[in-house]
């Protein structure tokens, strides 16, 4: 993949990374995604630690959450043209971001398996350094931003999160969270309850037109 500045020794690993479970229930990118998620998380943590030497842990955590979010991963996947190469099953608009994000993590996992830590670290560092520079001030995560807005504008009330029944296969569930605030309700999905609640809060921010 030229845009990644990396060439796979084992092309089958890349093919697997770009195969979603909806296209192949057995040979898909879920295991590579598992590896890629850990690789990305650690490299980005190291990157932020070095780039912002005076920031406290809380600020670094907010930066980290944004940089490894499904939204950021999906945007990177689009820039790299992965959306043109992913093999997927039935695709709906609501699932596109998650499929792209999962594929991006899987590609990073595939690089790690193909060539090891240094190669994967180099690819992540090259792409995510520029992304990290885009925010001069540490951003607030969607849940924090939503909570502060609702408290200020709804007489001290708080958003209410409800965790719905997970969907998908038992070995790889998709969590669903519903948030209610200021008379409105939105839902979010993710590979964990935390990710789903952040996605729900992000959707609520859009509904309330909070930038």
Image (cartoon, helix red, strand yellow):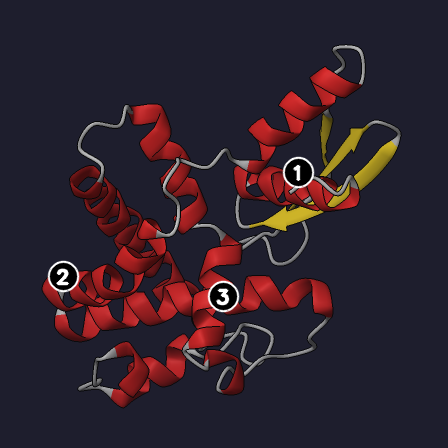
Q: Residue furthest top?
A: 156
Question: Counting other residues with Cα less than 10 Å from the Cα at mark 2, is it few (<14), some (14-19), or many (20 or more)?
Answer: some
Q: How far is disc 1 from disc 3 in space, using C-alphas?
A: 19 Å
Q: Quadrant of the N terminus?
A: bottom left
189 horizontally vs 2: left or right: right
Place of residue 107 in the rendered image (x, y in percent of width and height, measured from the top left): 34, 72
60 horizontally vs 180: left or right: left
Place of residue 96 in the rendered image (x, y in percent of width and height, measured from the top left): 62, 68
Q: How far is disc 2 from disc 3 in space, using C-alphas?
A: 24 Å
Q: Earlier in the sequence, mark 1 or mark 3?
A: 3
Identity of the residue drawn at 36% across and 41% down: 136
The residue identified by callout 2 is: 117
Above or below, 180 relative to 7 = above
Q: How far is disc 2 from disc 1 in space, using C-alphas?
A: 34 Å
Q: Identify which residue, 209 or 89, lies in the foreground.
A: 209
- Which numbered tag is attached to residue 38? none
Q: Earlier in the sequence, mark 2 or mark 1?
A: 2
The residue identified by callout 1 is: 201
Question: Counting other residues with Cα less than 10 Å from the Cα at mark 1, is it few (<14), some (14-19), or many (20 or more)?
Answer: many
Above or below, 82 relative to 11 = above
- Which numbered tag is attached to residue 75? 3
180 horizontally vs 139: left or right: right
Q: Is residue 138 visible?
A: yes
Q: Quadrant of the C terminus?
A: top right
Q: Identify which residue, 81 or 179, lies in the foreground.
A: 81
Place of residue 55 in the rendered image (x, y in percent of width and height, measured from the top left): 26, 28
Q: Is residue 28 visible?
A: no
């Amino acid at each position: 993949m030229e845009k990644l500045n990396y060439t796979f020794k084992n092309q089958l690993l890349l093919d697997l990374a770009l195969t979603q479970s909806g296209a192949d229930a057995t040979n898909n990118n879920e295991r590579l995604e598992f590896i890629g998620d850990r690789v990305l998380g650690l490299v980005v943590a190291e990157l932020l630690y070095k780039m912002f030497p005076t920031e406290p842990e809380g600020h670094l955590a907010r930066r980290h959450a944004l940089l490894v979010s499904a939204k950021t991963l999906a945007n990177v996947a689009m820039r790299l043209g992965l959306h043109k190469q992913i093999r997927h099953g039935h695709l709906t608009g609501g699932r596109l971001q998650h499929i792209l994000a999962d594929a991006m993590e899987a590609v990073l996992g595939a690089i790690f398996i193909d060539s090891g830590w240094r190669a994967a670290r180099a690819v992540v560092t090259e792409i995510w350094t520029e992304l990290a520079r885009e925010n001069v001030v540490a951003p607030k995560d969607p849940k924090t931003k939503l909570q502060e807005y609702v408290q200020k504008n709804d007489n001290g009330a708080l958003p209410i999160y409800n965790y719905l029944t997970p969907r998908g296969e038992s070995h790889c569930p998709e969590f669903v969270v519903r948030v209610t605030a200021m008379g409105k309700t939105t839902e979010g999905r993710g590979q964990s309850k935390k990710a789903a609640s952040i996605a729900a809060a992000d959707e609520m921010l859009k509904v309330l037109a909070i930038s």
